Image: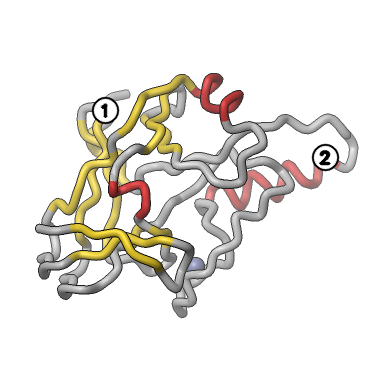
Amino acid sequence: MGLIIRSSAIHAAGCYTTTPIRKGERVAEYTGHRLTKDEADIAYEDSPITYLFGLGDGSVVIDGHCATMFINHSCDANCETSEEDDRVWITAIKNIAAGEEITYDYCLYDGDENDEARCNCGTKKCRGTMYAKTEIRRRQAAAKKAQKKSAKKKSAKKKSAQNKTGSRA
Ligand SMILES: [Zn+2]
């Protein structure tokens, strides 16, 4: 399997496969330095672009440093992410042809309150933002509360696994 990085219609650079990938096949691992949530929030407080992937309960994050960090978000993706023994894997959920761009749903959470994380995937299923559905609800509730309180916490948004079958409670 060969992954290459080149410019993408979705966002800046994207990750493409040079060979066909079968549904169910593992495409790559999301690797990088591991930081605590607090370290990541301080390091990326004012950074619009981050490559952070939250593990388990979110207390540890992977600061992406690999080809996989260039994989773009799509609301109708051809891959999904899963956690297994504190490692994050990207697995195909469709058959992918050679030359296609690899995508997965970022399921973002923990973003700054005024960061919309707008989605440009352009698919019919697009929800307009890269935030996870649970995060969209949380943000709506937080926005209501924010009318009363003016103090807002700053934090860097992070990706999360769609299925956490491998993580232990
Ligand atoms: Zn979208």
Residue 134 image offset from top left, x and y in percent: 54, 48
Residue 122 image offset from top left, x and y in percent: 49, 76
The amino acid pointed to by label 2 is Ala
Residue 102 image offset from top left, x and y in percent: 28, 63
Crowdedness near tag 2: few (<14), some (14–19) or many (≥20) residues, C-alpha within 10 Å = some
User: Does dot 1 land on a helix, a strand or a loop?
Assistant: loop
Q: CA distance from mark 1 to mark 2?
A: 34 Å
Of the numbered discs in the image, which one, if any, rests on residue 86? 1
Q: Eyeballing the image, is 157 above or below 116?
A: above
Residue 43 image offset from top left, x and y in percent: 57, 26
Earlier in the chain: of badge 1 and badge 2, it is 1
Q: Eyeballing the image, is 111 above or below 4?
A: above
Q: Eyeballing the image, is 20 above or below 118?
A: below
Which quarter of the rendered picture does the C terminus lie within? top left
The amino acid pointed to by label 1 is Asp
User: Does dot 2 land on a helix, a strand or a loop?
Assistant: helix
